[in-house]
Amino acid sequence: MVRGVPARFRRDALVVLPRGYPAAGLSSLEVLFSSHPEPDASSLRAARRALDYFADFGPRDLILCLISGGTSSLLTLPRPGVTLEAKRRAVGRLMRSGASIVEINRLRASLSAVKGGRLGRRTSARLVTLVLSDVPGDRPALVGSGPTVRGRRGDTTLVIGSNRRGLEAAARRARGLGLRPRFFGRRLAGEASEAGMRFARAASSLAPGQVLLAGGETTVKLAGGHGRGGRNLEFALGAALALEGETGITVLAAGSDGIDGSSMAAGALADGQTLARARRRGLDPRRALACHDTEPFFERLGDLLVTGPTGTNVSDWAIAICE
């Protein structure tokens, strides 16, 4: 990450990472570990340090800012009069309602002392912000709730990576393998299991050698029990329900960051035999969905995709292939 950066500049860098992420090669930088996906006291410390860091620069300086999805949790400092617990409750209620990432990040920014450009306004330095986007439309002000996007002339903001670019790279790779890629006609959104069913039904029309690609971010409306799992696992289970009995179609749903909700996995594989294999093991797919306990379901089948943290976050991908 810092290879090629002159040593005299390395001490002037602040890096905030999720706890558990590797920090190899960053020993010469100031590195803080913070909480993700839920903010805690470490998120407050990181936000306060970031504010102090920005305040040390003046109008003759330039700050290079690297922002990705996840920043909303890593840098959290509620505005005056709002407690961290109150903010967590408000955001949690909106997330459980099935709201989109755009709606959630707008609420986060409205309750924050650092988001919505407020971190950027702490300094008179010029800002260059490079963004890895995980939001629909790749709007920088919504990625990580836009802490450095302050709308000031002289600043530069560039999206250097996104979900769509990942899909385009996947399509190029598929062609290189002799496959014929198609893009799903809509961005993934809505209730995860229902989106998985829609995607699987579309995949059923693939011809041998075709690949169907889609990206986005679905939602899970929590009700009743809450076990281990996430939106990609529920998407994959929804796909399995729609594919039951079919042959030749395999679906993969996975998060680009390598973490799916409360599970240890990035996502899971599903095909037309998933449910039959599950029932032979005494597993109930609809109960797993109702209890939001999908990780044990796919773990028992050996169908989890476990990558570990990837170090990036550009939302989720779904891939279907017809053999």
Image: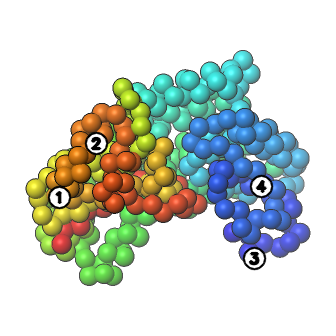
Q: Position of residue 240 (x, y in %)?
A: 22, 51
In the rendered image, the vertical position of residue 151 relative to residue 179, given as above or below: above
Give the CA separation, mark 1 to mark 2: 17 Å
Give the CA separation, mark 1 to mark 3: 50 Å
Q: Which mark is residue 237?
A: none
> Which callout, 1 or 3, points at the residue further toward the start of the chain?
3
> Depth check: 12 or 87 in front?
87
Q: Amino acid at mark 4?
A: Val
Q: Which mark is residue 4?
A: 3
> Which callout, 4 or 1, points at the residue further toward the start of the chain?
4
Q: Residue at x 33, y 59 (%)?
A: 303
Q: Amino acid at mark 2?
A: Ser
Q: Which mark is residue 193?
A: 2
Q: Residue at x 75, y 76 (%)?
A: 4
SS state under label 3? loop
Q: Position of residue 288 (x, y in %)?
A: 30, 40
Q: Position of residue 61 (x, y in %)?
A: 85, 55
Q: Is residue 140 visible?
A: no
Q: Residue furthest top?
A: 81
The answer to whether residue 188 is left or right of residue 48 is left
Give the CA separation, mark 4 to mark 1: 46 Å
SS state under label 1? loop
| CB within 8 Å, label 4 to label 1 | no
Residue at image mark 1:
273
Q: Which mark is residue 31?
A: 4
> Depth check: 271 or 63 in front?
271
> Which callout, 2 or 4, points at the residue further toward the start of the chain?
4
SS state under label 4? strand
| CB within 8 Å, label 3 to label 2 | no
Q: Residue at x 26, y 57 (%)?
A: 270
